[in-house]
Amino acid sequence: MTTGETDRRQSRRRRLVDEHGILSTHIRPGRQVRLVDISADGALIEAAHRLLPGKGVELHLKGPERRISITGRLLRCTIARLQSSAICYRGAILFDVRLPWLADDSPSGYRIPSGDTLTEQPEGVDATRPIVCSQDVLHRLPLFSQQLRARRHGT
């Protein structure tokens, strides 16, 4: 990348609660998700349940001064972390309507910082509380492991 290029993003991503003011995040029908970052146009979330790209979603955002529900479409989903007891999915949501309190003054995007100004952010900066897998997921994993072992050994 060279200095002076314009990023395709239309809005700045906000990772910290001090920047966006969101304390908790749920996706309908009430499943808790972790907000990785958010902009006026969309959000990056992590969830303990599978997220289906192309599907419409309703995101509930709660802060000290506001509580809103916003609809959007899930653009993509990847596995963010894989542990023996849990799977964590990361999905990108494009909102149907912009969030006005997160809209930037400059609609033409923002400049990419030069290498001299970049600071490393720790991986997984928490914007909301971490996801805790439900007991249902934790109880199914040993059964899955037993079935996998049985297939490998032909039993």
Image (cartoon, rainbow, N blue to C red):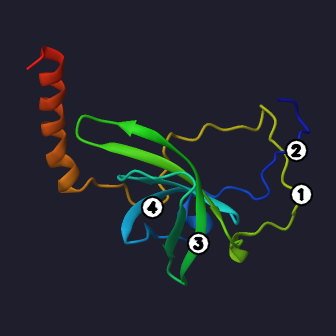
Residue occupying the point 38% across, 64% down: 32
| Amino acid type assigned to the residue bearing label 3 in the image | Thr
Residue occupying the point 27% across, 53% down: 133
Residue 106 image position (x, y, % from top left): 87, 63
User: Residue tagged by mark 2?
Assistant: 6
From mark 2 to mark 4, how far is it between C-alphas? Answer: 29 Å
Q: Is residue 53 above or below residue 42?
A: above
Mark 1 surroundings: few (<14), some (14-19) or many (≥20) residues within 10 A: few
User: Residue tagged by mark 3?
Assistant: 71
Near-viewer residue (20 or 99) = 99
| Amino acid type assigned to the residue bearing label 1 in the image | Ser
From mark 4 to mark 1, how far is it between C-alphas? Answer: 29 Å
Q: Is residue 70 left or right of residue 153?
A: right
Examine the image and state in which quarter residue 44 appears: bottom right
Can I make out residue 38 in this image?
no
Near-viewer residue (124 or 119) = 124
Residue 33 image position (x, y, % from top left): 42, 60
Mark number for residue 108?
1
Examine the image and state in which quarter residue 21 appears: bottom right
- In the picture, the quarter occupied by the C terminus is top left
Point out the tag, 2 or 4, that comes first from the N-terminus: 2
Residue occupying the point 17% across, 45% down: 140
- Of marks 4 and 3, the one in the foreground: 3
Q: Is residue 4 above or below residue 56?
A: above
Determine whether the residue tagged by mark 3 lies in a helix, strand or loop.
strand
Q: Is residue 24 above or below residue 5?
A: below
Q: In this view, does 136 lie to the left or right of 28?
A: left
User: Residue tagged by mark 4?
Assistant: 128
From mark 2 to mark 1, how far is it between C-alphas? Answer: 9 Å
| Amino acid type assigned to the residue bearing label 4 in the image | Thr
